[in-house]
Every structure is written in structure tokens, then in C-alpha cells.
Image: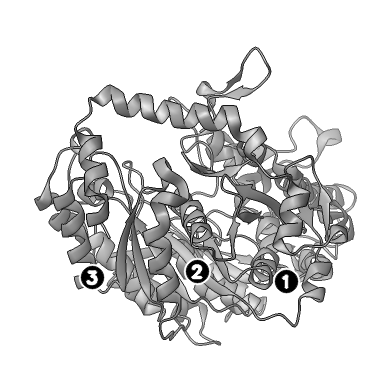
Amino acid sequence: MYAGRVGYHQERRAQPAGFFIERLFAVLTGISATTDHRLIPIADLAARTGILPDEFDLYGRYRAKLRLSLLGRLSDRPDGKLIIVTAITPTKAGEGKTTTSVALAEGMGRLGRHVALCLREPSMGPVFGIKGGGTGGGKALLAPMEEINLHFNGDFHAVTAAHNLLAAALDASIYNGNPLGIDPQSITWPRTCDVNDRSLRYSVIGLGGKAHGIPRESQTVITAASEVMAILALAADLHDLRARLGRIVVATRQDGSPATADDLKVAGAMAVIMKDAIHPNLVQTLEGQPALVHAGPFGNIAHANNSIVADRIGLKLADYVITEAGFGSDLGLQKFCDIVCRVGGIRPDASVLVTTVRAIKSHGGVPFAQLGAENLGAIRAGIGNLAAHIAIVRQYGLPCVVAVNRFPSDTRAEIELLERLAVDAGAHTVAAHNGFAEGGEGSVDLAEAVCAACEQPNAFRPLTPAGATIREQIDAIATKLYGAADVDFLPQATKDLERVRALGLETAPVCMAKTHLSLSHDPTLRNRPTGFTLPIRGLVASAGAGFVVALCGEMQRMPGLGRTPAFMNLDIDATGRTIGLF
């Protein structure tokens, strides 16, 4: 697949460095200048996709929300093929999972396949923090980019408001005589906001005297880590959403019984806040493929996947559905297979594992500044990480297509070596693509490889059988997927386990919260660490979502900002357009 593009790559390498900067600038500014008149009006896209006029609500000219009545009408239609896009362990070099997902959809469009994307909504925490936007890049881009990245149809705000209403109701109940007999020391419900703010991780609230509340310690998590966000992503419909919100456990009463959102009589109001957010959002790629963008759980601190209702709608509308799981296969893909598939009754057909030559060399120990130089030895040294992720995909019985997201500095020898080593490690096939620079035209080979993989025998299975205990699930994830030798339940985790059992959640699915920068719990352990002990410092029961969060190592559910966050590049120009958002 690489050989047909050798001339293109040689032409790129022959140009001076400034050529690549100018070319990238031309791609980005060209998209910015022409997006509005290149996009298909969303009502026309909906009609072309098979959605009736009374099955969507317009949010401007290029955005819509889909009504869940669509599922009822299409209930007898066979499901399409489901493809999970995941990646190796992230590096500073970049992998481009969303870019590859969009490019794959565009490539399938070039093949004449009926395809739909199902992706998570970007969180403004990373958009303003270190990551920037979450809509792909270059010509493999979702549009309208600005609206998707910022305040997208109000879904994140609805989650934040519903979550904080429950927090306010809890504190108000205690302040007003504590009729439920809640033990303030047992409160587990935090507050939330969609901004990276480490200062809010742990705080004291209720200061200022008796009129301002009862002082106590509290926490704040980012909106993507809210249990309300998980409920939005896992709910089957509005009524299921309402029932799950009511089951949220916020604290323990003095008699040891759980206190829930229904006990506080606030779950109905939360559902009212969320009644529009339950509807998936419809947008498009630059080449006109439909994209259902809905919910936004993070892969390192939540369950990492878009909503089940979006997946179900996509599977009824398209022959191929591409969904992206957060971070590496040890996080997003694991949670998709063990949580989403179980809850939603969904069965994937293939997985795409995204990597780059630069990322493999980074895992092989090459400093960032030297990643542009050919280094076959570093590829051999760093291939262990890719091999580990291939093994994780195969653990679930899925054919694995390795997608190599090309950079201008990649050499033919590096690509060919990476292809051989990936196949030796168990990949079904390897396909390099130029989706960023060429869109669908540069992704046809990848699309053909993925379509072929979807026709292969599929032995999909969860990692552990139904009914496995929390300990059994964590042991399996740690040893079979992460490469750990053992698991250490710290004293708080052991105490939390008793509380989980009391809530009847001992066999609920586990949602691991750990660093995305390593297969282990330690972000400094790169490539393919083995023989380590995985520390579990605590367990958080998410009764409404229906899973238990396991906190590994020092993982926090509220990120912080660095020295030069992405918001420093954002502004508006003289015409009022947003600039600096990538």
C-alpha cells in the first residue's frame, strides 16, 4: 500500500522546511476560508442520509439534533458494520486518532460506501488546555469546527448544570435540618466544571458563617468525568436517563443506607435539564459524510466513548459505522468492549489501531527534536508498545488494522519496517494514509483494508464473563492487558470495596481511571512496561451509570493547566471570526 505513494513522499522530502509550513498554513486557512460554502446544509445531509424532516431539529444551518423516534422507525433494518478506532499509548509526537477516524470515513466515501461517524464531543478543558480542538485536522476535519469545539449545542453545559443542581440539593438538604439523616463525612458527590482547574480538585465549602452553609471538604471533577456524563452516554432513551439519574448515590445515611438523587427529589429536575442533551448531534466531514457527535467522557478518567443512542442510530442509517474510543486500547477500547457493548448490546466487527512512525520512535527513546530523522533502530526498540496494543485488540477477538498516520518526515524504509513488525506482532493488515493532507483521496487504501477486515471471522468476546467480581475484573485488566504482575488494593480501596458490595455493585463493570501516558499507572514507564504492581487507591460507585470507577495510582479526575495553555492562542479577528483554534 505504501509503494503507490513513494513519489509523493519523495517530493515532500525534497522540499525545504518552509514548504511544509506554507503547505500546512494553506490547508488550514483554505479550510477556514471555504468551509461555509463547501458544507452541505444539514437538512439536505439528513435527507441524503435517510432521516425524515420530523426526525431532526435544526441548530443553525449546519447542525441538528436527531430525535430518538428515528430508532423506532428503523428498528427492523439490519445493523451495519461497527469499527472501533483506537491507538497506541499517546506521545508528544502525536498519533491523530480523530484525524484518522475522519479520514477513514472520507476514504470510505470515495469508495462509495454508506458510512457514518460516531464520535465524542470535545471538552473545553482540553480545547483551552494542552490538546486544543477535537475535530480532526487538515482535510480530515469535522465541520463546523468552531461550533463543535465550543459550547456544542449546549450538551456539556446541560451535564454541568444537572450535576451541580444535585450537589446544591444535597447541601441544601443537610443545611435545612438534614431530613434524610445523611452523614456529611460520607458524601461522595463532587461538583463539576468544564475547565481544567487543579485548584478545585480538593476544597472546603460552606465558609462564611452559618448563613452560608455547613463547612465540609469537597471535590470538583471535570464535566467529562461526571457520572451524569456517563449516564448521558449509556442511557437508552429519556426514560432510562431519568431512571439512571434517580439511582445516583451521593452519600450514606446515618443508618448505613445509601442516599440517592431520587431521595433528594431532584432527579426529575435533572432530567428536565437533560431532555435536549439526550438527542445526538448531526454534523459532517469536509467531504460530506454524516457524523453523530454526542457525549464526551474521557478515556483516562471515565468510560471513554460516545453515546449508545448515537451508535444505534448510526448502525441503522449506515453500512459502516466508525466510532472512536478514547486514548489507547488499554483505556477506550477496553471500556467499549467491556462496558458499552454489554450495556448497549453492541458487537464490533473490527478495530483500527492508529500509530505514527514518530510515535514509535518516541517509545523507542528518541528525543522529540530528533524524531524527524530516519532511525530504524528506534522503530525496532519502540515497536513493543504497538505490539502490546495489537495484543489487546486480539484479546477481544477482533481483527486489527494498523493505521499509520503519515508525516512528511517518514521515510519509505521506516514505513516498510513498521509494516513488517506490525504484521509479525499479529496485525491483520497495515495501511498508511495521508488523510490530513489529502482527505479521502489519501485514505482509500486504509478504507479498503478496513472494509476487508470487517468481512473476516469475528470472535468478539468481553475480557471477563458476566458476573465477574470487581477484584476479578481489575486483576484481568491489569495482568492480561496492562502487563502488570500483581494488583495492590490500598486500605481506602479495600474499605470502598465493602461499600460497593453493600450497594449491590460487586459484579458491576469496572471503569479504570489511570494515566493515558503509559500502559501502567506510572506515566514515566514508556513503551511496554511489565512486572509492575498496579496500585488501586480507591473505588467510586457510579450506581446510575452502572459501573464502578477504580482509581489507579495518582490519577486525578480534574486536569490542570500548563505554562502555555492553548487558550493563549485563541482570539477573534476584525470580522468576529475565531482564530487560533486547531
Q: Residue 110, position in %: x, y?
A: 50, 57
Amino acid type for the residue under numbered disc 2: Ile
Would you name the residue on which mark 3 appears?
423
The tag earlier along the polypeptide, 1 or 2, is 2
Mark 1 nearby-residue class (10 Å; few <14, some 14–19, many ≥20): some
The tag earlier along the polypeptide, 2 or 3, is 2
What is the distance, in whole Å, between disc 3 and disc 1 at their CAs?
55 Å
Please tell me whether residue 232 is drawn above or below residue 239 in the rendered image.
above
Would you name the residue on which mark 2 appears?
83
Q: Are marks 2 and 3 in contact (CB under 8 Å)?
A: no
Amino acid type for the residue under numbered disc 1: Gly
Would you name the residue on which mark 1 appears?
256
Amino acid type for the residue under numbered disc 3: Val
Q: Residue 197, position in %: x, y?
A: 57, 35
What is the distance, in whole Å, between disc 2 and disc 3 at their CAs?
19 Å
Element at badge 3? helix
